[in-house]
Amino acid sequence: MKFFSSEEIIESATDAQRKYSDPNFTSQINYLCKDYFAKIKTEIVKNKKKLLKEAVEDHQLELISQKNQIETAFVTFERKIKDFKEGSFYPDKDEEIRKYKCWLGFAALEEKDYRKNYIPEDIVNKKNEKQKEIENLDKEQLNLEDKLLLLKKGEILTEDNSDETSLESINKRLREIYFKKINLKKAFKNLVELGNEKIIENSKKKSHLEQTIKKFEEENDLYFPEISEVISEYKLEYEFEYSHVVPSSKLSFITEKLEFLEKHFLELKTNGELKKSIVKLSLDKEKSRLDDDFRKIKFEMKKNADHLAIIESNDNKQLKRIYDEYFYDEYEENLLVNENDLALWESELIKRKSIINNKQISEILHFTPLKHLSSILEYGVLSNEEISKKNLTSFQVDENRFDARPNFICTSVSFPNSSLLRMKQYKYGPFIIISISPEILLTNVCLFAKSNAATTWYKKPSKYDSFPMLNKNESFLDMFSRDDIRDKNRIPKNFATDLQAEVLIYKKIPREFIKKIYCQSEEIKLNLLKELPDLKERESDFISINPKIFERRIDQDYWESNKNLIKIEDETYENHDQWIEPSDLELGEDEIPW
């Protein structure tokens, strides 16, 4: 399959496994593609080796970083040991108390600023609302009193007896306003008193904060924020921890936590000797863990260095082992045919060449309408499926493809199926016959059907059936079986026994395998040369007039009466699709062309 493109080779290998699932067919595809697969495998291995080297080098940098972290941990551990020997058994607790003392200072200063400008906003807002309601009622009362005075003077007529201007309605509303104002003024007075209480309470808390801060300053506490040198050490952590807490609550939260820590720390010191043994045990465990970590990292770094050396040495067996440690996919893709299949197909194709020579097969034939010749000279002979993939315009003369193999090309050995050819010509017009070199049988996958490939017995495998793909020599030789029938009908040595016998060729037949184009008459040849002037530049006999090859085959009468070789060999075989009757064309007796 040297004439297949890279994409077609990969597609064919996938196609063989997915569609046909026949080991003979799949292994032949792999065998014919073996050189390309070897090239692909080399490229894949090269790329994966590069990828592996990058991964190992990245791992080396990661190991160096881990080693540095362990060495830093050892330094910290040595400081802990030094503190332990000097009697400071609780560096973590000391640090925790220092941190909370610092946070206490932050909270005290923050609340001091908060208290400085404190106003009980909720009380102020409610007080303003009450004040506004009282003012609105005062305005309404004044307006009603003016109306009442005008009524008494008779300056406002009351004949319409309107509710808004009657003496009764005005007096009623004035009474409602009076009592409502009394209640509002009481509420306003209560709010004023509550606000004053809040301000006095805030003043007391502010005074307490000032005393607390003064105490910090007098004690010269190292961790108080205003005078400490470690402010930045805790500031960011404090803001993260307490940013969501209102300033008035932070101090109480931190004070409570600090009191708990100091109490717990005091208990630790009270039980010093007991706790000292516990701390020593903890330090011993930490030392053991650090030693283990250091041994492991040294081992991993040595292993990593060995991996890099193997990559440079190109030891594929070792490379595969390392690759499997780093990645999930396979280092070497299974693209090569195994040794048994290699030997099988080497032998099979040698024998096939011998069969071709012994049977004196000089050409394989494929007939097609005249209009297809221009595309055939450009692309070669293509299967229906390949034609569709390339979006080529093609006149389908076998739309049904009862053989269920649209990716194969139907051909005959030495002489065409004259019965089918004559019928197609009658229906579609003049055909040409393409002569193909038998070398195609050695360079592409071919299926050998001793009778019409459309018969049920020859259909491709499915999930229900597992019929063989017939691509081996035993199927090829079977096309020439039954000497009794051959002798009786004087069938030439290079003809298949059954008139309808077929060779199905996979995907395409390249232009270089086309030997000749047979025309039935001079007129057809001249038309071809007129439509395709480039043909004149080819060999003089490339377009050949050969009316005999368009005639009935010598044994056609026999096969029309006996249907096909399969029926002869098995009288119980039910034949559905293998022979096309004249009635299928809806022709009258006088219209049948033979």
Image (tube, grey):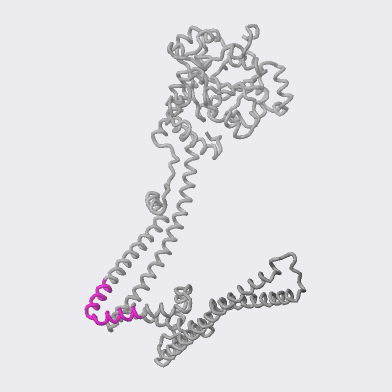
Q: Position of residue 129 (x, y in %)?
A: 59, 75
Examine the rendered structure and indicate whether residue 21 appears above or below residue 136: above
In the rendering, at what x and y percent does residue 26 appear? 45, 33
Of the 4 image quadrants, the one containing the C terminus is top right
Q: Is residue 209 left or right of residue 588?
A: left
| Count of marks placed on residues | 0
Q: Is residue 267 magenta?
A: yes
Q: Front-most of 325 and 146?
A: 146
Which of the 4 quarters of the picture holds residue 230? bottom left
Res. 139 in view: yes
> Looking at this view, is 515 or 499 the one in front?
499
Judge from the rendering whether residue 525 lies leftward or rightward of residue 574; answer left or right.
right
- The residue lying toward the viewer, choosing from 566 and 82, is 82
Compared to 241, does 404 lie above or below? above
Task: Give percent across and percent down for residue 149.
Answer: 72, 77
**In this picture, residue 524 sits left or right of residue 303:** right
In which quarter of the view is residue 222 placed? bottom left
Q: Which residues are magenta?
A: 259-284
Q: Main secondary structure of the magenta part?
A: helix
> Is there any visible trace of residue 494 in the rendered image?
no
Judge by depth and name the residue closer to the eye, 60 or 390. Answer: 390
The residue at 49%/25% (across/down) is 447
Q: Is residue 460 magenta?
A: no
Q: Residue at x 60, y 32 (%)?
A: 388
Residue 264 lies, in percent from the top left, at 30, 78
Taking 73 as reference, is 230 above or below it?
Answer: below
